[in-house]
Image (spheres, rainbow, N blue to C red):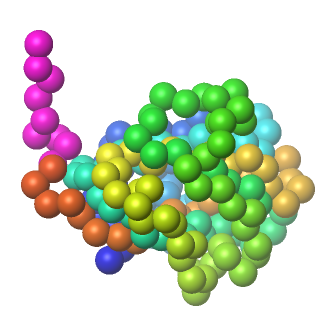
Amino acid sequence: MELSSYVDANRAIALNQDESHPVANLFITGPQYELRSDADDQLVIVFPFKEKVKIQGIRCITPQNDTRPVRIKLFINNSNLDFSDCEARNGDFEATLADTDTTTDSKPLALRVAKFTSVDTITLFIENSTGGEISAISKVEFFGQVMMGTNMNELKKVG
């Protein structure tokens, strides 16, 4: 099952985004809409989910040019990472993307389900692009299932 409807788009953030191509573009359909980096080709994107999910796969759809991300890391349930943290830590999933991995027809990258079982946020770190000054991404799709009964918007802080 594709989980886009469970991503809380209003709470998604991106560090180093080009303000004219913001993270909100990831949630709009169309090839002209994309998230782009600003100062260099690195991006940190936080995807909060409305409910806890079990993620089995991810697909990053990107332009097929020198802005295509190459090296990515995923971090589970850690929404406060900055660039130094992402560079220094091993991701819960890491991949080098080929151009065949980043189209709408690409097979999703398989994730270790045991590790991605109770996810409320995913942080995606784009480490670099194929050689451009910036990175660009059109859409990120998560595949898996919803862990029923865990609407994160209904949780109340105790104390």
Side (left or right) of 125 relative to 142: right
Residue 93 at what x, y percent from top left? 59, 55
User: Is residue 144 left or right of 87 when viewed as pictured?
Assistant: left
Measured as percent of width and height from the top left, residue 19 is found at: 59, 38
Q: Quadrant of residue 44?
A: top right
Q: Residue at image x 57%, y 72%?
A: 109
Asked if 133 appears above or below 115 in the picture, the reply is: above
Q: Residue furthest right?
A: 131
Q: Quadrant of the C terminus?
A: top left
Q: Is residue 50 magenta?
A: no
What residue is at 86 percent from the left and 54 percent from the top?
Answer: 132
Magenta stretch in the rendered image: 151-159
| Vertical placement of residue 10 versus 113, above or below | above
Query: Which quarter of the rendered picture does the N terminus lie within?
Result: bottom left
Taking the spot 22% from the left edge, 52% from the top edge, the residue there is 51
Residue 152 visible in the snapshot: yes
Q: Is residue 87 above or below residue 159?
A: below
Q: Number of numbered discs present?
A: 0
| Residue 157, picture quadrant | top left
Q: Residue furthest bottom?
A: 105
Q: Nearer the viewer, residue 78 or 135?
A: 78
Query: Quick one: which residue is furthest to the top in this view?
Result: 159
- Can you see residue 141? no
Front residue of this view, candidates 129 and 143: 143
Name the residue at the front extreme: 114
What residue is drawn where x is 49% and y is 65%?
112
Q: Nearer the viewer, residue 70 or 25?
A: 70
Q: Position of residue 57 (x, y in %)?
A: 48, 70
Q: Nearer the viewer, residue 38 or 154?
A: 154
State the image quarter where residue 68 is shown. bottom right
Image height check: is 43 above or below 140? above
